[in-house]
Image (spheres, helix red, strand yellow):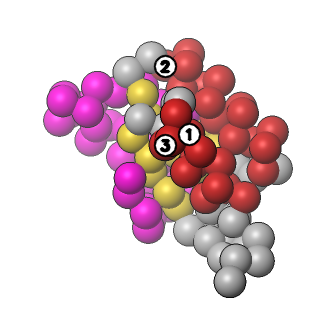
Amino acid sequence: MFNGSTLRDKVAYIAGGTSGINLGIAIGCAQQGAKVVVVGRDGAKAERAAAEIIAASGGEAIGLSADVRDYDAVENTLRAARDKFGAINIVI
């Protein structure tokens, strides 16, 4: 069913993707070809998660900082994600 390119040319925006289940989902999306944006409150942790995703998948990822309770901060990360990778196809 999955062949390593199932999500090619898709962009996944994953809030809370810096650890735990959502980091696993982010890695899985990248392994299937998606460009991944991970968002967390701690910018350094988000960047480390992006590096981990790249190392695990060979794909593309960026880490951004935002508190999901802050509408403007989330809007800024969505804008940055679109600027970097284009239209967002998957939101977690």
Which quarter of the rendering shows the N terminus? bottom right
Left or right: where 72 falls relative to 58: left
Q: Which residue is drawn at 62% across and 30% down?
A: 49
Amino acid bearing label 1: Leu
Measured Cα–Cα span from mark 2 to mark 1:
15 Å
Residue range highlighted in magenta = 63-92
Kindly identify which residue carries mark 1. 23
- Indicate the secondary structure of the residue bearing disc 1: helix
Image location (x, y in percent) of residue 83: 48, 50
Is residue 32 covered in magenta?
no
Q: Residue at x 17, y 35 (%)?
A: 71
Are discs 3 and 1 less than 8 Å apart at CB?
yes
Report the number of discs.
Answer: 3
Query: Which circle's residue, 2 or 3, is located before the other in the chain?
Result: 3
- Indicate the secondary structure of the residue bearing disc 3: helix
Q: Is residue 67 visible?
A: yes
Q: Can residue 79 be seen in this view?
A: no
Image location (x, y in percent) of residue 48: 65, 24
Residue 43 numbered mark, or none? 2
Amino acid bearing label 3: Asn
Q: Which residue is drawn at 45% across and 17% down?
A: 42
In the rendered image of this protein, does residue 67 appear above or below residue 17? above
Measured Cα–Cα span from mark 2 to mark 3:
16 Å
Query: Which circle's residue, 2 or 1, is located before the other in the chain?
Result: 1
Label 2 vs label 3, nearer the camera: 3
Is residue 86 covered in magenta?
yes
Kindly identify which residue carries mark 3. 22
In the rendered image of this protein, does residue 5 appear above or below residue 38? below
